[in-house]
Amino acid sequence: MATTAPTTKNILVIAGDPSGDLHAAALIRALRAKDPELTVTAMGGVRMQEVSTHFIYNLVSVGAVGFAEPFKNFFLWLKLIKLARHYMEEKRPACVIAVDFYGFNHQVLGLAAHRRIPAFYYISPQVWASRPGRAGKIAKLTKEIFVIFPFEEALYKKAGGNATFVGHPLLDLIPEPAEREVPPPGGAWNIGILPGSRKGEIARHLPIFLKAFYRIKEVHPKAKAFVFAVPEFPDDRLVPELESVEKYWSKDVEIVREQDYRQRAKLDFAFTCSGTATLENALLGVPMAVAYRMPRFSWEIAKRVANVQYVSLVNILLKRPAVKELLQEKATVELLTQEAFSFLNNPPRIRASRKELTGLRALLGNRGAAERAAERILPYLR
């Protein structure tokens, strides 16, 4: 183990999924704005790479989620853990900041604890959804846990953790809902397609979402679809996926890459993979159908460890089925289309849904989550 003294202006930040990468980048910007002399080494995605001093590896591109998938990357996992350990021993960072992604990050936190390097968790794992025992493990390995849902603070404190509710970071990114005429002139409905951010999710969801859209187009010829893509899945990888759906790829389908949510805010309805996208849609006031398919092995395990009634964050937060959830064999073109028409054929339902969904803003605290977390981290570095 290296014996060099800690470098007080150097920190290590690790995230492993697209949403974590997005919010970690915002935290890094907030930290560096408050202390311009700070240097940041990151392991995450393209957003973190843009704002960090040194970038180790694009962990987000691995896309290992679920229960079976991480085993496929076992040897890569070992390599990346060794990289993190080597960095800690050589550079002795002033602290380590983990962002979500428990499977990898809890090992990193263990490495930091063994080397007496202070560690923080920003956007802690949703232990309330499954495997609540993780809360105690995180509590033992961190100086402070920054949670983004108000009910999480008490949960982690009960487990012995030093938890602080900082608000949800999406509030700083998502604009106020845009006013939309319902129905749109000439039936020119804007339909969102959000199949997920990883190759497996896209392969499972994109075909059925596109086919459901074309069912809508049979009734509303002027309808148009927008496929929302993440930086980790560039066009040269996404277009072949679209073209593989035979005729379901045309001028009526547009790929969208954006950071300001302006196009998303114009949607009238969306077919959405379960995940952060459901909460983003809700804050924009976009009615949706939520679908998710996963490998059978992962699904059987998920059913046994799940500790919540719903899978979408919208329904979990509202504690009621505000959006339709179509999981596994229920995620079909027929049921997705049926749910879409229950809105498109009933404009008052669209208006009521928009009001209900945007009401979620009041449950997520105030803007400035990254700034509040940064303010609490920086004193440890001085």
Image (spheres, grey):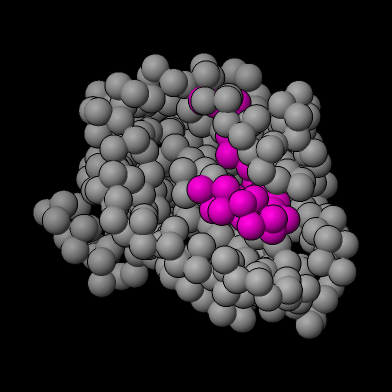
Above or below: residue 308 compared with residue 156: above
Q: Residue at x 73, y 71 (%)?
A: 6
**Residue 75, horizontal then vertical, whole percent:** 28, 56
Above or below: residue 260 compared with residue 337: below
**Residue 367, horizontal then vertical, whole percent:** 80, 52
**Region rendered in magenta:** 107-130
Q: From the viewer's perspective, is 164 left or right of 69?
A: right
Q: Is residue 88 magenta?
A: no
Image quarter of the N terminus? bottom right
Q: Is residue 129 magenta?
A: yes
The total number of labels drawn is: 0
**Residue 363, horizontal then vertical, whole percent:** 76, 34
Q: Residue at x 14, y 56 (%)?
A: 244
Q: From the viewer's perspective, is 116 left or right of 193?
A: right
Q: Nearer the viewer, residue 79 or 148?
A: 79
Above or below: residue 126 compared with residue 232: above
**Residue 372, horizontal then vertical, whole percent:** 83, 55
| Residue 362 visible in the shown view | yes
Q: From the viewer's perspective, is 41 left or right of 26?
A: left
| Residue 277 visible in the shown view | no
Q: Residue at x 69, y 58 (%)?
A: 117
Image quarter of the C terminus? bottom right
